[in-house]
Image (cartoon, rainbow, N blue to C red):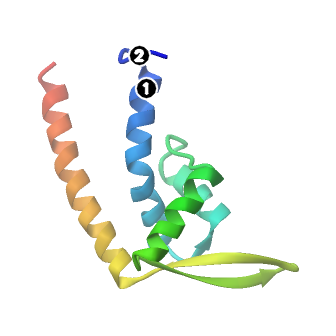
Amino acid sequence: MAVSFTSKTYWGGMLNASLCKFFILKAICDGPAHGYEIIRRVARMTNGFCVPTEGTIYPVLREFQRCGCVVCRKEVVKGRTRKVYTITPKGEEAFKAGAAVWRQGLCCVEQVIGQE
């Protein structure tokens, strides 16, 4: 199937995919949370622009765990076990690095769009 570069859906998907990890990390920076709460936080902070699915969020959380950006503990709530993710100092550092890069990238995008 051919890619439609004129489609807003295509460009939105590309942006969403690259920002998803950044938003997930920010959601955990805002406080410990389980997966569903992280999804809600991301949706809220992006006004629904980025709403990660379970198929997206859990592989990202495992990746963040492996690299030491988050730690996970299990807790039981109403008889159900959930994993609660907490940011680490390395995760905070990763978020700051990502924020700096996105800030720089946004400036470039604004300049280019402003030339139109």
Q: Is residue 59 left or right of residue 96?
A: right
- The part of the image, by quadrant, that contains residue 78 is bottom right
User: Counting residues from the N terminus, which is met first, the one under dot 1 or under dot 2?
Assistant: 2
Along the viewing direction, whichever of 107 and 72 lies nearer the viewer: 72
Q: Which residue is mark 2?
A: 4
Mark 1: few, some, or many residues within 10 Å (few <14, many ≥20)? few
Q: Secondary structure at mark 1?
A: helix
Which residue is located at x 45 percent, y 75 percent? 66
**Picture mark count:** 2
Residue 12, percent across and down? 43, 32
Give the amino acid at mark 1.
Tyr
Q: Is residue 88 above or below residue 37?
A: below
Residue 51, percent across and down? 56, 46
Mark 2: few, some, or many residues within 10 Å (few <14, many ≥20)? few
Q: Is residue 82 above or below residue 21?
A: below
Q: CA distance from mark 1 to mark 2?
A: 7 Å
Q: Which residue is mark 1?
A: 10
Along the viewing direction, whichever of 71 and 101 lies nearer the viewer: 71
Which residue is located at x 37 percent, y 75 percent? 91
Q: Secondary structure at mark 2?
A: loop
Q: Is residue 87 left or right of residue 5?
A: right
Q: Is residue 95 left or right of residue 64?
A: left
Which residue is located at x 38 percent, y 39 percent? 15
Residue 16, percent across and down? 44, 41
Along the viewing direction, whichever of 70 and 41 lies nearer the viewer: 70
Residue 17, percent across and down? 43, 44
Q: Is residue 36 left or right of residue 68?
A: right
Q: Quadrant of the C terminus?
A: top left
Q: Are marks 1 and 2 in contact (CB under 8 Å)?
A: yes
Give the amino acid at mark 2.
Ser
- The part of the image, by quadrant, that contains residue 57 is bottom right
